[in-house]
């Protein structure tokens, strides 16, 4: 009886491993969806950008901060709108697992930095840097970089034009976290 149970258990385990491998493989036709293919091309294309200083600050902050921050999940959430908006479906979960398997968090973060809507029709961190600070990214000081990073959480809420006090408080908090200072 025990041998039969172990055979069934290991057979099911092997089947599940093969199924997961197939679901995350390039052979799965779900990854031929036009929006998903476009997302992977855009993530690859974003790699040519040099956002090292922003990414370093972002990663230092979010390693210490206990907020949800998964750039690959945010990248997958960018698929849509339209008839293929997947919500929290199995398809979207598979897209997330595939993106996370094929790309690093920093590669997904570069995609987000290139495509994020900072408000006022400013798409991407380069455009936002010019609009909010009248500077190129390379010219930004730490506080300005942290301001743009704060806006990634919610560009409407942390808008430096409309909510100066809220942005000031959020930037102060993030800078304290960045420099590991307690209250």
Image (spheres, rainbow, N blue to C red):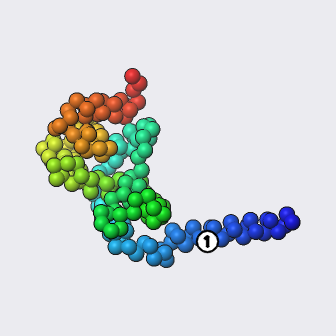
Quadrant location of the N terminus? bottom right
Q: Mark 1 points at which residue?
A: 18
Q: How crowded is mark 1: few (under 14 residues within 10 Å), some or many (20 or more)?
A: few
Picture residue at 38% right of the left edge, 73% below the top? 33
Picture residue at 78% right of the left edge, 69% below the top? 7
Relative depth, front residue between 92 and 52:
92
Q: Say whether residue 98 is visible.
A: no
Q: Where is residue 119 in the image (x, y as percent from the top left)?
A: 20, 48
Q: Say whether residue 171 is visible.
A: yes
User: In the image, 160: left or right of 89?
Assistant: left
Picture residue at 27% right of the left edge, 53% below the top? 116
Q: Which residue lies furthest to the front in this view?
A: 83
Q: Position of residue 137 (x, y in %)?
A: 21, 47
Relative depth, front residue between 166 and 109:
166
Q: Where is residue 99 in the image (x, y as percent from the top left)?
A: 43, 62
Q: Quadrant of residue 135?
A: top left
User: In the image, 16: left or right of 170?
Assistant: right
User: In the image, 98: left or right of 44?
Assistant: right
Q: Position of residue 62 (x, y in %)?
A: 40, 41
Picture residue at 42% right of the left edge, 40% below the top? 67
Q: Is residue 138 above or below residue 77?
A: above
Q: Is mark 1 on a helix, strand or loop?
A: helix
Q: In which quarter of the image is residue 6?
A: bottom right
Relative depth, front residue between 156 and 31:
156
Q: Residue furthest top?
A: 183
């Amino acid at each position: 009886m025990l041998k039969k149970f172990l055979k069934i258990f290991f057979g099911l385990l092997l089947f599940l491993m093969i199924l997961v491998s197939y679901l995350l493989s390039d052979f799965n036709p779900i990854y031929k969806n036009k929006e998903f293919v476009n997302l992977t091309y855009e993530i690859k294309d974003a790699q040519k950008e040099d956002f090292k200083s922003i990414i370093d600050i972002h990663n230092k902050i979010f390693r210490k901060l206990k907020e949800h921050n998964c750039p690959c999940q945010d990248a997958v959430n960018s698929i849509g709108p339209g008839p293929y908006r997947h919500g929290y479906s199995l398809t979207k979960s598979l897209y997330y697992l595939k993106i996370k398997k094929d790309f690093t968090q920093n590669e997904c973060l570069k995609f987000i930095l290139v495509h994020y809507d900072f408000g006022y029709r400013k798409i991407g961190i380069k455009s936002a840097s010019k609009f909010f600070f009248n500077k190129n990214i390379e010219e930004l000081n730490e506080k300005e970089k942290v301001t743009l990073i704060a806006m990634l959480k919610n560009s409407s809420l942390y808008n430096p034009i409309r909510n100066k006090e809220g942005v000031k408080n959020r930037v102060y908090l993030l800078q304290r976290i960045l420099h590991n200072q307690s209250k």
